[in-house]
Image: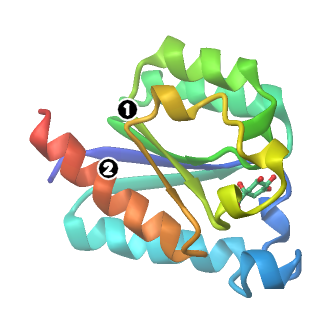
C-alpha cells in the first residue's frame, strides 16, 4: 500500500469529542482518534493527514486541496453537515476521490433527521455505530477498496 495518500476529515463539533455527549460519542478525544489512525496508516505504510473544521466552507476548501495534494482516498465524518450539506456533496462529487462516510453513533437508531444523508449514495460505503472504532474500520475498508481498484 506504499504511496497511498489518505485524508481524514472531521466536521463540526467533533473537536469537542471526549467531553461532548460521551454517552453517545464516547470518551476518546479527537487527538486520540487521529493518533490511532496515524499509527494504523503507518502500519499499512500509507501517508495519512487529518483535518477538522466547524465551518462548511473550510471543509469544502480542504476537500478541493485534496486534489492538489494527490490524495487517493478520504475518510470523512461530516457530522451534522451529513444531514444538511449539498455543498459537501458537490465538493466530493467535484473532486471525485473515493471516500468512506463515518459516524461514531448509529445514526439510524437516533432522531429521524439523522437518517437522511446527502453523501451516502456517492460514498464507497458507510461505517456507523462503532464509536471511535468506526474510523479504524472505515480506514481498513477504504484501503482494501483502493487496493482492489487500482
Ligand atoms: C455524527 C452523527 C451526526 O448526526 C451528528 O450531527 C454528529 C456526529 C456521528 O459521528 O455519530 O455530529 O456524525
Q: Position of residue 59 (x, y in %)?
A: 71, 34
Q: Position of residue 2 (x, y in %)?
A: 15, 52
Q: Say what secondary structure mark 2 lies in.
A: helix
Q: Is residue 9 rendered to the left or right of residue 15?
A: left
Q: Say what secondary structure mark 1 lies in.
A: loop
Q: How packed is label 2: few (under 14 Cα within 10 Å), some, or many (20 or more)? A: many
Which quarter shows the C terminus?
Answer: top left
Position above or below: 1 against 66? below
- CA–CA distance between discs 2 and 1? 8 Å
Q: Say whether marks 2 and 1 touch (CB < 8 Å).
A: yes
- Please indicate, yes or no, whether residue 53 appears anywhere in the rendered image: no
Q: What residue do we see at 15% from left, 53% from top?
A: 1
Mark 1 CB near ligand 1 (8 Å cut): no
Q: Is residue 100 rendered to the left or right of residue 118?
A: left
Q: What residue do we see at 78% from left, 73% from top?
A: 17
Instruction: Please give the residue where the numbered disc 1 appears in the rendered image.
Output: 98
Q: Is residue 146 rendered to the left or right of residue 90?
A: left
Q: What residue do we see at 58% from left, 74% from top?
A: 33
Q: Nearer the viewer, residue 115 or 46?
A: 115
Q: How many marks?
A: 2
Instruction: Please give the residue where the numbered disc 2 appears in the rendered image.
Output: 142
Please tell me which of labels 2 and 1 falls first in the chain.
Answer: 1
Q: What residue do we see at 72% from left, 83% from top?
A: 26
Q: Is residue 8 rendered to the left or right of residue 148?
A: right
Q: Nearer the viewer, residue 138 or 63?
A: 138
Find residue 22 and report its image quarter: bottom right
Q: Position of residue 112 (x, y in %)?
A: 81, 47
Amino acid at each position: 500500500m506504499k504511496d497511498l495518500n489518505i485524508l481524514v476529515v472531521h466536521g463540526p463539533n467533533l473537536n469537542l469529542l471526549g467531553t461532548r455527549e460521551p454517552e453517545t460519542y464516547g470518551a476518546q478525544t479527537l487527538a486520540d482518534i487521529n493518533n490511532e489512525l496515524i499509527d494504523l496508516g503507518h502500519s499499512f505504510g500509507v501517508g495519512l493527514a487529518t483535518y477538522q473544521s466547524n465551518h462548511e466552507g473550510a471543509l469544502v476548501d480542504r476537500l478541493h486541496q485534496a486534489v492538489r495534494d494527490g490524495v487517493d482516498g478520504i475518510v470523512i465524518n461530516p457530522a451534522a453537515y451529513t444531514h444538511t450539506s449539498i455543498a459537501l456533496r458537490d465538493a466530493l462529487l467535484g473532486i471525485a476521490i473515493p471516500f468512506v462516510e463515518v459516524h461514531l453513533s448509529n445514526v439510524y437508531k437516533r432522531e429521524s433527521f439523522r437518517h437522511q444523508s446527502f453523501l451516502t449514495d456517492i460514498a464507497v460505503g458507510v461505517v456507523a455505530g462503532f464509536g471511535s472504532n468506526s474510523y479504524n474500520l472505515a480506514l481498513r475498508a477504504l484501503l482494501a477498496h483502493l487496493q482492489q481498484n487500482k
